[in-house]
Amino acid sequence: MARRNDHTREELISLTLKASKAFLSKHSYHELSLRKIASMIGYVPSTLVNVFGSYNLLLLHVVAQTLDELASESKLAVKKCTDPKKALYKLAYCYHDFAQKHPYRWQLIFEHNMNGEDLPEWQAERINGMTSMLEALLQVIAPHRSAQEVLRTSRVLWAGVHGITLLSVDDKFFTAEPVDGKALIEDLLSQYLANW
């Protein structure tokens, strides 16, 4: 077993998050535990609690890194696109593709629960950063729309894309023929935007 002074606090955080993400590349977070993570990195669970505050906050750090990666990929996806409508499609496809690549980490984002505790400001800022990308594109597409209309539309589109992505990742379309989630996203966006 490693001793607390074998790694600095920052090294231990990095080691823990790296091990957690590696585990989540093949397994659901339901199979993960504080004890399992501690064992993977050669520490005792109490050391991780001392560093992160709780198992719940440790998982929230995994969620934060996952959101950072999704944000980075999203920015790259729309960066060179000069047409805001095409950028909106690229953003939605990026969301779908990220979930397909990292299904267990992506699921953790939405299944993680703060159990009554307030969401830390650093996490709320990440979530706002993701939704503001969508809102900014919609504002450019329809500059005549009010901020409230843009906000509402962003949530409708995000909910639709998220639902399609969720069913796609879980393979829950319940059809005899394979269903292309990205084709459904294209249908959703084109129909909605045509009537907006």
Image (cartoon, rainbow, N blue to C red):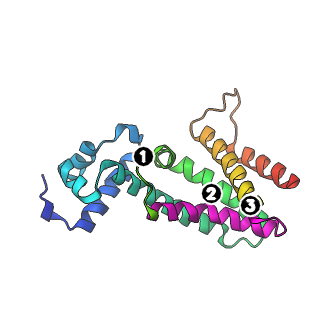
Q: Is there any visible trace of residue 97 in the rendered image?
A: yes
**What is the spatial separation of the Cα atoms under label 3 and label 2, in whole angstroms?**
25 Å
Front in this rendered view, residue 32 or 100: 32
Residue behind mark 2: 94
Residue 78, percent from left and from top? 67, 67
65 lies left or right of 160: left
Front in this rendered view, residue 171 or 34: 34
Q: Which corner quadrant of the image does residue 136 belong to?
A: bottom right
Residue 41, percent from left and from top? 23, 52
**What is the spatial separation of the Cα atoms under label 3 and label 1, in whole angstroms?**
28 Å
Secondary structure type for disc 2? helix
> Which quadrant of the rendered structure holds the C terminus?
bottom right
Tell me what residue is drawn at x 60 percent, y 68 percent.
Answer: 75
Does residue 133 belong to the magenta stretch?
Answer: yes
Residue 105, percent from left and from top? 46, 49
Q: Which mark is residue 188?
A: none
Residue behind mark 1: 116
Secondary structure type for disc 1? loop
Does residue 161 belong to the magenta stretch?
Answer: no
**What is the spatial separation of the Cα atoms under label 1 and label 2, in whole angstroms?**
31 Å
Q: Is there any visible trace of residue 27 in the rendered image?
A: no
Q: In this view, does 100 lie above or below 177?
A: below
Task: Please provide the residue range marked out in magenta.
Answer: 122-147
Tell me what residue is drawn at x 66 percent, y 60 percent.
Answer: 91
Residue behind mark 3: 148
Whichever of callouts 3 and 1 sits on the residue coming sooner in the sequence is: 1
**Which amino acid does the dot numbered 3 rest on?**
Gln
Whichever of callouts 3 and 2 sits on the residue coming sooner in the sequence is: 2
Q: Is residue 54 above or below residue 73?
A: above
Magenta span: predominant SS is helix
